[in-house]
Amino acid sequence: MANSTEEAKNQMLEAIGVHSVDRLFEQIPDEHLTRREFRLPAPLTSEVALKRHLLDVLGKNETCENNLNFLGGGVWQHHVPAICDEIWSRSEFLTSVWGTPSSDLGRNQAWFEYASQLGELVGMDFVGLPVYSWGAAVGHAFRMAARMTGRTRVLVPALMDPQRLDVARTYCGFPEQEGHLEMVAVAYDPATGRLDLADLDGKLDRETAAVYFENPSYLGVIEDQAAAVCRMARRRGAEAIVGVDPISLGVIAPPSDYGADIAVGTTQPLGIHMNGGGGVGGFIATRDEERYAREYPTLQVSLTDTIVEGERAFGLTLFQQSSYGSREEGKDWTGNSVYLWAIANAAYMSVLGPTGFEELGRAVLRRSHYAARRIAEIPSVSVEWPTGFFKEFVVRYDETGLSAAQVGARLRAKGIFGGKDLSGDFPGLGQSALYCVTEVHTRGDIDRLAGALEEAVCA
Amino acid sequence: MNNGLRKYHAAVWDEPLVMEMGAPGRRGMLFPDAEPELESLAGDAGGLVPEGMRREKAADLPELSEPEVLRHYLHLSQETLGMMGISLFGTCTMKYNPRIAESITRLPFVADTHPDQDIETLQGTLEVIHGLDEMLRDLTGMDRFVFQPGGGADAAFLHATVTRAYHQAAGALSQRRKIITTAQAHPCNPATAAAAGFDVITLPLESEGYASVEALRSVVSERTAALMVNNPDDIGIYNPHIEEWVDIVHEAGGLCFYDHANFNGVMGRVRARELGFDACMMMLHKTFGAPKAGGGPAVGAYGCVSELAPYLTTPVVVKKEGGYTVESSGAARTTQVREYLGNIPVIVKAYSWLRAMGAEGVKEAADLSLLANNYMETRLLEIPGITKGLPHLDEYRMEMTRYSLGELTEETGVTTVDVQNRMVDYGVDAYWMSHEPWFIPEPFTPEAGEMWSIEDLDYWIDVIAAICDEARTNPEIVKTAPHNQPIHRLEGSGLDDPERWATTWRAYRRKHGSGAAAAASEG
Ligand SMILES: Cc1ncc(COP(=O)(O)O)c(C=O)c1O
């Protein structure tokens, strides 16, 4: 702290005309001042000591770099191009706060490029700046749909990440409150893992504000009835909201192709490290129609002009409907979010380009299907829905006599983070785990997993 | 500029949009089928996507090589001022972000960990979270902290949902529908209260600089669910009756939430629990040295008393024999504001900052931020045209002061927006004017914090003084500013016009036609 020298303090005290800094706290009544002796640990005043301490503590973590990782479920290990880290960690981006459209032109342009490129992936032309997470995006989308339709019920898939569902539910409130949204689960077809359309049909009624489904689903299944789901929703006057993994969109049809009204999802796979779950971010995208645009809770930048003919700028659009502009009259609320990641996302999308996304999608499809086949060959282990998935699939251990936790522990002993244990969250799937295979996995990695899994269950 | 200030001009790259760059067939990142045998083993990739669900038309993304992408974004970074100059952006406590924490959090044991890893493989992360929890408990007196909220507003939302769950469990939610806040409270307090399903009561500012105890009394009742306030506010005023406020709300059965975003001026001196609060929120991306990042990743650390702990978002980190583990409670299903444990890198940065500062350092930082603010005040008030917000209140302000340029505007027509746009011509980051509502004409709110040197503060003030001088001698230069930035002032008339706004390139081309796009790119 530059002004911690006695000279600096005295200079400031003198200019202010007081003898002691305590005088400056005069507004705080004496009885508000704490008498406490704080117990914070003694300060690590040198960078060398601080670094050593952080390395010692954090060094207790195991990582997905020094283990072979197959965990996914909404946070995925994809390759992070080195330039993404180089770009977001630039001090200019890292330390910017708000600025003006002129002085922070570059950051605002990068945000516009984020929205524009994401819009191309999902096939939508109105995209807000990111929200905290996928679950937050779902929650906001529900509230947008409720405001647009004046209805009070939302349908969600029975097979959804329980935490994501909890976040969305948090945005819906309690029945004893006005404006509460009721959440109703739509069953899945056990044979395919896809939505049960008959159940959906029975639950869609005049109170349904939105039908939410995911594509691929939480358990990896590609929802090939997407167009029918959206049609059914629209026919009953409900909004069709789809949650997508943007990295799948090089090979899977964009939401606009099958008639979704609102696309949401996570930004993490687009060039952001998993960060122990700290890498998440959520997006909301729709057609550029006033009906939707006027319900966005987010900030968003629009391409516009300066006072000089022909010069481009980027300014906030529809600011007045945000909580900054209208407090409790605004649409939900907004605040600091994950805008830095949006810059890395923009760089990611432009360095991949159309062919990169397609190639990446193919690599993921091949590797994950190869893995599913190898695993299905292991005696007493089966793959629940062995075709029609992207990146993730469910492996069942029931016939091995082992719990998913036991299998996980045996794999861990071999330096492998096996799939995510689903037994607690989805008892209907027995002792099972969700495996994620991406472009970072080689054939050798997959063979190693298959071998280790076979040993684990046969031991 | 011959006013003794440094020469400055921002980088101008006239950078096209990334979507306008590149050429067909150019590639930046390859994911070759390095293992062609996978094809025969796994089948044709295209065929692995069910019929009807394949992407037919490639996404219209740019086609660029890696170095082009890097250069493009480096240019954009150079066209961003950030903290390259001096940033006294008030209400946000701009401080140095130690690069040691930046570099540590980029290492694999933070960056490349998965949240669902077995808890035994994340002991380092849990130790940091628990360590930060304990330190914040010490500073505030709360019983437990969680770090899931993705920003200050999200922590306010967490409080609103905890309030909801707490009263619901007591069967009182249909009765307790009101959350009380004040006009000076940050907009996120009323906004999140409303989003959580409450009616909002906003107490107006009164002549003492805060709403009166009587005003509070007149709205508190058995319908009160909670009070949500910050103290001090952004004008720099500390409400000395806050303990009484808390008592009044408690007596009526409501909860009290301390939005501690303005912690920098009171840290080490005031503890939220001792004032009676049930919960508080601090911003790790503000007070605790993590970068602002243009708007996150951020963390609103939320702390509460043990009575509210059952309603917390989950998982929470707890100490166990020989290490740490996580716990979840069922009640959290209506207070889960974000997935997983929080923005881990931001948590590590805050932990690192507090370990480096220690209790004495934290207190000294608060001292320095008040010293710096009041030092600035003496100089700023010498500049003709600048007055202090609520000038009749002459006690020393806390860590920031809100000022008014109203007199300057009356005299010269130059507004606070003009001054803001002119500051950046000197390489100084634009100030924050004021959150809604504006009580003070033509407001601006600098916050010095503890990090900026006296020379920096003086330079900032010199810039404001020079601009006020220009307002009198050459008002046009201020009204048409900026002149030394990559582009001129925004012409924002189309921003709220559905025929013209465009948040994507796709929308822009549709609304403005390719002719408009071409004309714009020639500019
Ligand atoms: C007093 C106060 N409360 C809450 C917030 C909201 O924080 P965030 O933008 O992180 O959501 C701020 C932001 O600066 C603030 O100053």
Image (tube, coloured by chain):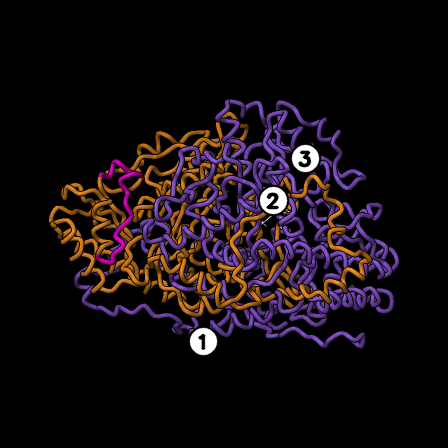
Chain colours: A orange, B purple
Give the label on residue B67, or none. Answer: 1
Q: Is mark 1 within 8 Å of ligand 1?
A: no
Image position, residue A195 (x, y; %) = 31, 39
Residue A420 falls within the magenta-colored stretch:
yes
Residue A241 falls within the magenta-colored stretch:
no
3 vs 1, front mark: 3
User: Separation of disc 3 and disc 1 at Cα?
Assistant: 59 Å
Q: The disc labelled 2 sits on which kind of residue?
A: Arg
Q: Are marks 2 and 1 in contact (CB under 8 Å)?
A: no
Q: Residue at left 46%, top 73%?
A: B22
Image position, residue A127 (x, y; %) = 51, 53
Could you tell whether B85 is left or right of A394 in the image?
right
Task: Locate the N terminus of chain A by quadrant.
Answer: bottom right
Could you tell whether B499 is left or right of A240 in the image?
right
Q: Residues within 10 Å of mark 2 (few under 14, many from 20)?
A: few
Read off the chain for label 2: A
Q: The disc labelled 3 sits on which kind of residue?
A: Glu
- Of residues B356 and A209, which is closer to you in this image? B356
Q: The disc labelled 1 sits on which kind of residue?
A: Pro
Q: Which residues are magenta?
A: A414-430
- Of residues B273 and A444, which is closer to you in this image? B273
Secondary structure category for the residue under label 1 = helix
Read off the chain for label 1: B
In the depicted structure, whether residue A51 falls above or below residue A42: below
Read off the chain for label 3: B
2 vs 3, front mark: 2
Which residue matches tag 2?
A36
Splitting the image into 4 quarters, where does residue A95 fall? bottom right
On the question of residue B515 being in view, the answer is no
